[in-house]
Image (spheres, grey):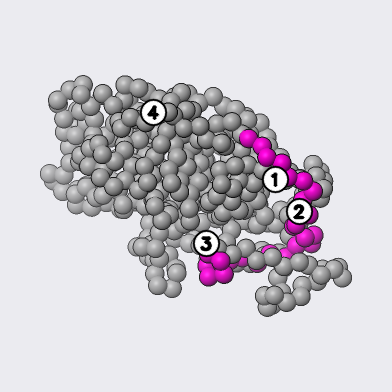
Amino acid sequence: MIHRVTLGKVPAKPHTQLWENDKLLMEQMITRGGFEGPFSILYYRTPPTGDSGAEPIEIPGYSPVELAEEQPLRRRHLETAKTEPNGNWLTGRVTLVTADGLDVGVCKPTEPGRRFFSNGDGDEAIFVTEGSGRLESLYGVLQFRKHDYLVIPKSTPYRMVFDDGPATMLWMEGTAIGIPGEWRNRWGQLSDFAPYSHRYFRVPESLLEPSDDDDTVEMVVKRRGLLTLHRYDYFPFDIAGWDGVVYPVAFNIHDYQPKTGLVHLPPTIHVTFGGPKFVICSFVPRKVDYHPKAIPCPYAHANVDMDEILYYVDGDFTSRKGIEPESISLHPAGITHGPHPGTYEKSIGTERTGELAVMIDCYPPFRLTEAALGVEDREYHETWGESSDW
């Protein structure tokens, strides 16, 4: 929902006839918020309603979710680099934490996957930690590369096709993931003081064409936390054209324009995407505070309303020790969090930070899954007691 896009052919007026080779195309509206919200209109060569079968399936580790029995209130460190590569971009998903309106996990696919996926439980934001390829969706083909965010609207049929080489991604499923209102002017345009512009968002460039293997198509649909497999004896996404503002987009984290202040600024200045109960922030290399007595390392903070997740991608992490790329730290509400001992004073005089990370702050509390316990550093909470030297 960045700006209006047209791809392929559409009639001059919505809800009027569009013919191709003496055949009337079928119009479909995809709407958000009933008929009050944003929408796109698509034109099908073959009606998309002809699935020939549906059956329940499961993807262990992803759906259904198995929660950890005990959830003690403590700081957590999940070493997701230890997660074993497995499956494809969908079957390899592992849910690590879940909250009301937001699930977060990782995926390290090792094989191709031909099935499509439609997430009826929410929008998706996928951060591509490693790898490149193309997102093939109902709206066409969208190329992606390392360190891209992919924002995929709710109930969009899509599949990911990775290029050769290792692939890792952080995935988030949430309610109404989009551009925060504070970055838009009253006309809906991204404002000049937003941390990005319309030019940085990439959209599908060509319509999707079936491959030789798409005579029969399978699509996994997620709804109410459960999965159903639907089969089509034809290619159901044969689109002649579409227009509207609902479609997937790609945005590279290195195009995020960070802000710097005289003294340390709160994490809200790093907000990139958000939903009703959460925000997704981007920490990128930047110049830090320039007051002569500034302390660049973040101050201690009492989480009284939100749980905080930080997914470490690359670079030096100023406030943390013992953190590696792909680590996830979880600092829950109810426990004050702050810099590791020795990092606060050490940061004085620092002029730049080289960290690259994705942060997620969420009002509903996160709960860990059994899969998360398998990669947890159980000693992380106690590391703040190792020294009284700040």
Asked whether 40 falls inside the magenta stretch, the response is yes
Kindly identify which numbered label has been placed on residue 1: 3
Give, as a three-letter code, the residue at label 4.
Glu
Whether label 1 touches label 2, CB < 8 Å:
yes
Instruction: Return the disc, 3 or 2, that comes first in the chain's sequence.
Output: 3
Q: Is residue 149 left or right of residue 214?
A: left
Give, as a three-letter code, the residue at label 1.
Met
Instruction: Return the disc, 1 or 4, that comes first in the chain's sequence.
Output: 4
Gap in Å between the C-alphas at discs 3 and 1? 24 Å
Q: Can you identify the residue that label 1 sits on?
A: 219
Q: Can you identify the residue that label 4 sits on?
A: 70
* Residue occupying image coordinates x 34% and y 41%: 308
Give, as a three-letter code, the residue at label 2.
Pro
Label 1 Cα crowd, 10 Å radius (few <14 / some 14-19 / many 20+): many
Instruction: Return the disc, 2 or 4, that comes first in the chain's sequence.
Output: 4
Kindly identify which numbered label has been placed on residue 236: 2
Give, as a three-letter code, the residue at label 3.
Met
Q: Where is residue 156 in the image (x, y as percent from the top left)?
A: 62, 53
